[in-house]
């Protein structure tokens, strides 16, 4: 049984080491929670949060500018289409009115 004594002593040392490591990890976790809680209470944003918020603002500003430019192009193109269509419509009505002014209903020359 003398062989078992050192072995049991090693086991006891391993148990204590694992227990100590567990306590250290628990303390680190508690410390992380404390830091997070104080960070939230202080109202200060972490640098990553600030950079993310700036990135989101830049994205939205760029997207709004793209949308504005697309609407501008749409309205300019729509105005050109109306101008062409309305010009053709005006010409049609002028021709029809002129033909109705002629006594025989023909287009005047």
Image (cartoon, grey):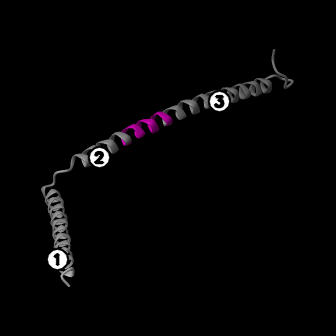
Task: Give the secondary structure at mark 1.
Answer: helix
* Most common secondary structure along the magenta stretch: helix
Find the residue positioned furthest to the top: 109
Q: Is residue 61 magenta?
A: yes
Locate residue 80 relative to residue 6 in the image: left or right.
Answer: right
The front one of 36 and 14 is 14
**Which residue has dot 1 on it?**
9
Residue farthest along the right direction in this orientation: 104
Residues rendered magenta in the picture: 60-70
Give 100 or 59, whichever is nearer the viewer: 59
**99 to the left or right of 59:** right
Most extreme residue toward the bottom, as rendered?
A: 1
Q: Residue at x 84, y 26 (%)?
A: 105
Q: Secondary structure at mark 2?
A: helix
- Percent position (x, y) of residue 104? 87, 24
Q: Earlier in the sequence, mark 3 or mark 1?
A: 1
- Which one is in front in this view, the residue at disc 3 or the one at disc 1? 1
Mark 1, Cα crowd under 10 Å, few <14 / some 14-19 / many 20+, is few
Q: Residue furthest front?
A: 2
Crowding around mark 2 (Cα neighbors within 10 Å: few <14, some 14 to 19, many 20+) is few
Q: Quadrant of residue 86?
A: top right
Q: Please provide percent x and percent y for residue 13.
A: 16, 73
Q: Looking at the image, which residue is at 16% across and 77% down?
A: 9
- Is residue 101 covered in magenta? no
Task: Tell me if residue 97 comes above or below residue 71 in the rendering.
Answer: above
The residue that label 3 is drawn on is 86
As helix, strand or loop, the secondary structure at mark 3 comes to helix
The residue carrying mark 2 is: 53
Location of residue 93 by image quarter: top right
The answer for how far apart the CA atoms under marks 1 and 2 are is 56 Å
Gap in Å between the C-alphas at discs 3 and 1? 101 Å
């Amino acid at each position: 049984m003398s062989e078992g004594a050192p072995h049991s002593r090693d086991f006891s040392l391993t148990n204590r080491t694992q227990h100590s490591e567990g306590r250290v990890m628990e303390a680190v976790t508690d410390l992380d929670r404390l830091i997070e809680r104080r960070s939230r209470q202080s109202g200060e944003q972490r640098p990553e949060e600030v950079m993310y918020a700036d990135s989101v603002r830049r994205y939205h500003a760029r997207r709004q500018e793209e949308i504005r430019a697309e609407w501008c192009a749409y309205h300019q193109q729509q105005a050109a289409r109306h101008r062409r269509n309305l010009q053709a419509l005006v010409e049609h009505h002028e021709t029809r009115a002129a033909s109705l002014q002629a006594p025989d209903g023909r287009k005047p020359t």
